[in-house]
Image (spheres, rainbow, N blue to C red):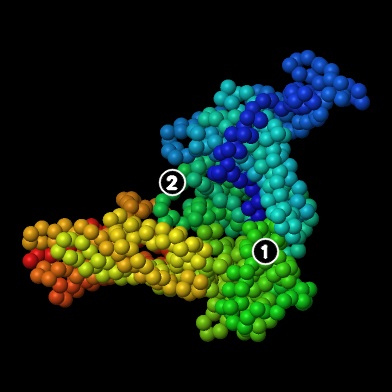
Amino acid sequence: MHHSRRLLPIRAPQRTLVAVLAVLCCAAPADMIILRDGHEYEGTLQRSTESVVEFQQDGAVKQYPRADVVHIRLQKTREWGEIRQLKDIPDDVLKACVATPIDPAKHPGAGVFVLLSQTRVQLQTPQTWTTANRFIVRILNDHGEDATIREITYRKDVETANIRHGISIRPDGEIVHLRDTAIQEESPYAELPRYDNVLNCRFALPEGKPGTVLDAATDVTRHTALPGDFFATEFRFGNLDPTREMVIEIVAPTACPIHWQMLNDPTETVRFDQITEGDAVRYRWNRVDMPQIISEPLMPPLADIVPRLVVSACPESWEGIAAAFQRDLDACDQRFRDIPPPPATTAEAIWEQVSRNTDEYPAPLLATGYLPSDPAETWRLRRGAQLDRTYLLYRWLKAAGLPDVTWVWIRPRQAGLPAPKVPSRNALGLPAVRLGGTMPRWLIPSDDLAATDEPAIAYSGAPCLLPGQGLGQVPTAPPESQGMDREVTATLDRKGGAQVSEKICFRGPTARSLRGWRRMTEEEIDNEVQGMVRATDQRATNIHHSVGDVTRNSASMDITLEYYVPEFADVRPSLISIRPPWLEFDAREVGRERREFDLFWPAPRSDSVKVRIVSPTGYSIYSCPEARDFTSSVVQMKTEQQTAGNTSCFTMHYTRPALSGPPESYFDLKNCLESRADLGRQYWVWRK
């Protein structure tokens, strides 16, 4: 997906950049002369000769000897560059946007009001096109300050970018223009030359104050085709900010048909028009009065909530795309024949070599393209983009003779579901390797703290592209693949103190925190243990621990804690009472009384807590939490209470097998978690 073609706001931590660039761009567009004595003046260059420079400043033309001038910085003239008042701009669209009445009180939490989001695409061929973006917003309050920062990301070897105009309109109608000094271009991947083909053009519009209207227009042109890369993009008709209007126009030659599909719009809030203009077809979608979306906990990605337009000029089916990529991959295998021999013979060991000994470089597919580079170079550098690390893993698994090694593309669920009717390689951005057999495995290179199958857990249920099969799905991991099991034994003495023995088993990604101890000193590990224990009770003393082999990336990690808590229980002449902290649970994330959106989780999970309390001799249990069970389609909880002699035991098993659920299932989750929290609030009481 060509997200880089769209004009995207830059979020925190950009506030420092906002402040610096805003100072540079408050004045009207002007040239700048820099003198040898250190003075700088803004104005207009009139004439420059070998001996003298004539420069207009403060309404008068001054002459400077050429030898006294260090540098002259010329301001580029952009669209409407000489206009200083809104009334003089020949653009009715902009004037209508500025005239739109807005009541900030009706949009709580919103920093900006989007007046117009417009994208126009002119296709020349399925692999070359021009995208023109225009974004007009009104800043509502200080939280909208980040909207002044805009960014274009493009591939400099096959694309060009241009800022048509950038203006800020003050409440009194005065126009303040973008200054060249407020534009910064950087190569984000210059550190690794094999990916140094992307440029970020970042600029700051002036006057980022409440009431100001910002208008930025940019163009990006793909002038050279990339192998296997066809025009494909997605547009969301809705956002967290309220929007007056969004318009998408695509002009495609009749010889270059496009495929498109609108998702998440059952009531047809997006209007569509199609007009034939000579030998081209104009497609137009627009939606008006898009409300502000108030975020909810555990909500799906916006791509699955708001209407989403998916467009592609790729002429092939999903199966054809998979077959074409496999042919390209086979060609890469022939091209890069000479690679280092695999360092191991098993899939786990090979995966570990790639994950531990090659660092991931954050270069996106825009920089790498969809065809991998030389795996021998990736291994030599011990560093590469995810695409190239995956290809190294793929080649070594094949070289080791492992059966049924296939390349797959995954679309993370956070990106939303793909459009079945719009095949596109761009829709699936995460490379992975699949090992077949009776129990297929999905391998994704990670880092030195991950277990072999752990990265695939994060993509449970994600759509994928399988060779020879088309669209498929990553298997959903079982709930026991991640979570935490806790077993506690607390022996009370007659003074109310408690000798505690605690064993915790971290499963799946939750075990990363313990594996990270391999990078710590003994003192740092001791501080971590102290923090874990004192998070339970600040009064804990005499703390000891033992932990499994943190150098091994096993699927689960165990740690045992031993400590003493003085005055843990409230002791009276005839009774003892405590509220065990190990059953406490925070249910604030489900505190709402209503729900609009579906529930969404990255992966299933299960947790268990077993608390065993041994009371002093002569005391018998009088009250403790009663066993209660809860079962629904999205969550289950089972509890058990047992007493034998002076030992009382309470066990809780919590399982969340689902990846998602309808809005009404939120109340099942709410009831379950509030019931779980209630268990942690109850007192245990013993009497003589």
**Mark 2 sits on what residue?**
294
Depth check: 57 or 429 in front?
57
What residue is rendered at 81% in x and 16% in y? 61
Helix, strand or loop at disc 1?
strand
What residue is rendered at 29% in x and 59% in y? 540
Q: Check the picture and name the quadrant holding the C terminus.
A: bottom left
Q: Check the picture and name the quadrant holding the N terminus.
A: bottom right
Classify mark 1: residues with Cα within 10 Å, few (<14), some (14-19) or many (20+).
many
Depth check: 326 or 640 in front?
640
Side of 509 relative to 118 (left or right):
left
Helix, strand or loop at disc 2?
loop
**Mark 1 sits on what residue?**
384
In this view, which residue lies farthest toward the top? 60
Depth check: 193 or 197 in front?
193
What amino acid is found at the position of numbered circle 2 in the picture?
Answer: Ile
Side of 133 relative to 265 (left or right):
right
Residue 208, given in percent of the width and then of the height, sits at: 57, 32
What amino acid is found at the position of numbered circle 1 in the picture?
Answer: Gly
What residue is rendered at 45% in x and 70% in y? 508
Gap in angstroms between the C-alphas marked 1 and 2 = 39 Å
Side of 450 relative to 120 (left or right):
left
CB atoms of marks 1 and 2 within 8 Å? no
